[in-house]
Image: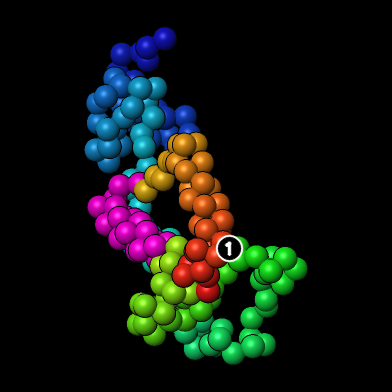
Amino acid sequence: MPAPQGAVARDGASGAPAPAWPGTPGPQGAEALPGGYVPAPPPSLPRRLLTPVATLAGVVAAFAYVGAVDPNEPGHYPVCPLLRFTGLYCPGCGGLRSAHAFAHGDLPAALGSNALAVVGYGIFAVVMAVWLVRAVRGAPMRLAASPAWWWGTGAVLALFTLVRNLPFGSALAP
């Protein structure tokens, strides 16, 4: 039922004047959506950058730790349980040595320890760059992967594990 002539419709939650028609500017010049809903203003730049920068800082801190504490010396890190109990290399075996070499700028040693991890570092760098650019622009970051992508990733990990444990794939073993 429309408000009586001369009366101002009020928003029930805030008491602010509600827009007369959907799609007309509401309070503070915000564009009202159907039903009189006025969306919240976008978060500030520091707020948008908080999550990607904190994620990047955590990864940098982890690489700094692994770069400082050499995984090639025994006793600093636990042994891979799969390697210890079966003698087989998992897809992550050599990952700490790879990260240590990568942190010291030794790309050939990083590739020799775990080539798949080095590929992962590159993928992470691209995703972080996209995430930071989108955060600066105010666009949300959405990573939607189809089931085929997940199955493909699992197949690559399984194939990498299989090949690095066979005699002809010894170059992929850490």
What residue is shown at x 37% (from left), y 26% (from top)? Answer: 36
* Left/right of residue 160 with respect to residue 131 in the rendered view: right
Residue 62 seen in render: no
Tell me: 29 left or right of 89.
left
Q: Nearer the viewer, residue 126 or 164?
A: 164
Residue denoted by label 1: 165
Determine if residue 32 is in view.
yes
Identify the residue at image location x=57%, y=69%.
Answer: 93
What x and y, as percent, mark residue 134? Answer: 29, 52
Tell me which colouring the rendered structure shows. Answer: rainbow
Seen from the viewer's position, the closer of residues 116 and 35 is: 116
Please identify the quarter of the rendering in which residue 144 is found.
top left
Which SS type dominates the magenta stretch? Answer: helix
Please determine whether, in this image, residue 77 is positioned above or below residue 83. below
Measured along the vertical axis of the image, is residue 49 above or below residue 62? above
What amino acid does circle 1 point to?
Asn
Choose top left, top right, bottom left or bottom right for residue 101: bottom left
Please state the extent of the stretch shown in magenta in the rendering.
Answer: 119-140
**Residue farthest along the right direction in this orientation:** 85
